[in-house]
Amino acid sequence: MLQLDAENKDLIAELKKPFGKLYPNFEDAIDVIKSSEFLISVGDATFDNLTKYELYPNIGIIDNLIQRKNHAHDVIRANHILKANNPAGYITDDLWETIGQALELSNNGECYVIEVAGEEDLAVLPCILMANPETTILYGQPNEGLVVLKARDLINKAQKLIDGFIEIN
């Protein structure tokens, strides 16, 4: 299990910056999203925005919170819901394993949702490291918009950030 080092101000500052292209308006990213061969979304607002446009990621990672406030999805159009435990400020082994399981299962073209008990914010990092390099990953940048990235562009950065976490056994 990895814990975010609260004393590492540089790491925290890097994690707050967008990892990819920031789209202030979700609609401006739709063409990029539709052209993606494999899509992972992280965050409830991102998942909601996708489903409003009847776009379904191969993997959606949610925690039923939007900016730390409870959020109940009206309908999750996914027959496959996986569960993972991941407290805020951590990347648990359970989250890594569940993302790995979803990556293996999701090649059938169906949407798999990982429902996280705790917080999903840091799940972007394991997704970058574990997914096919051509995977498109989406997540929300609070109060700024949607971030869209290709895993291949951030593998080294994601590993460097992960290396700044504290490993807990």
Image (spheres, rainbow, N blue to C red):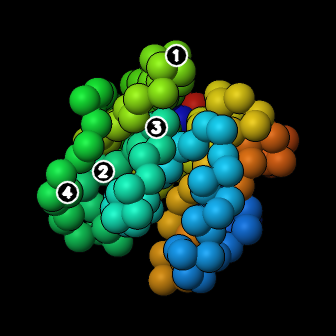
Marking on residue 63: 2
Marking on residue 104: 1
Q: Residue at x 77, y 34 (%)?
A: 133
| Distance of label 2 from label 1 (alpha carbons) | 21 Å
Give above or below for 77 relative to 8.
Answer: above
State the residue position of label 4.
Answer: 73
Q: In which image quadrant can residue 164 be found?
A: top right
Q: Secondary structure at mark 4?
A: loop
Give above or below for 154 relative to 102.
Answer: below
Q: Amino acid at mark 2?
A: Asp
Q: Reading the chain from its start, which is encountered first: label 2 or label 1?
A: 2
Crowdedness of circle 3 by 10 Å Cα count: few (<14), some, many (20+)? many
Give above or below for 112 relative to 148.
Answer: above
State the image coordinates of residue 38 (x, y, percent, origin top left): 61, 37
Q: Nearer the viewer, mark 2 or mark 4?
A: 4
Q: Residue at x 68, y 68 (%)?
A: 18
Q: Secondary structure at mark 2?
A: loop
Marking on residue 59: 3
Mark 1 and mark 4 residues within 8 Å of each other at the beta carbon: no
Q: Secondary structure at mark 3?
A: strand
| Distance of label 1 from label 3 (alpha carbons) | 11 Å
- Name the one closer to the observer, 90 or 149: 149
Q: Is residue 77 left or right of residue 128?
A: left
Q: Residue at x 42, y 47 (%)?
A: 56
Q: Residue at x 46, y 37 (%)?
A: 59
| Distance of label 1 from label 4 (alpha carbons) | 25 Å
- Name the one closer to the observer, 99 or 4: 99
Q: Amino acid at mark 3?
A: Ile
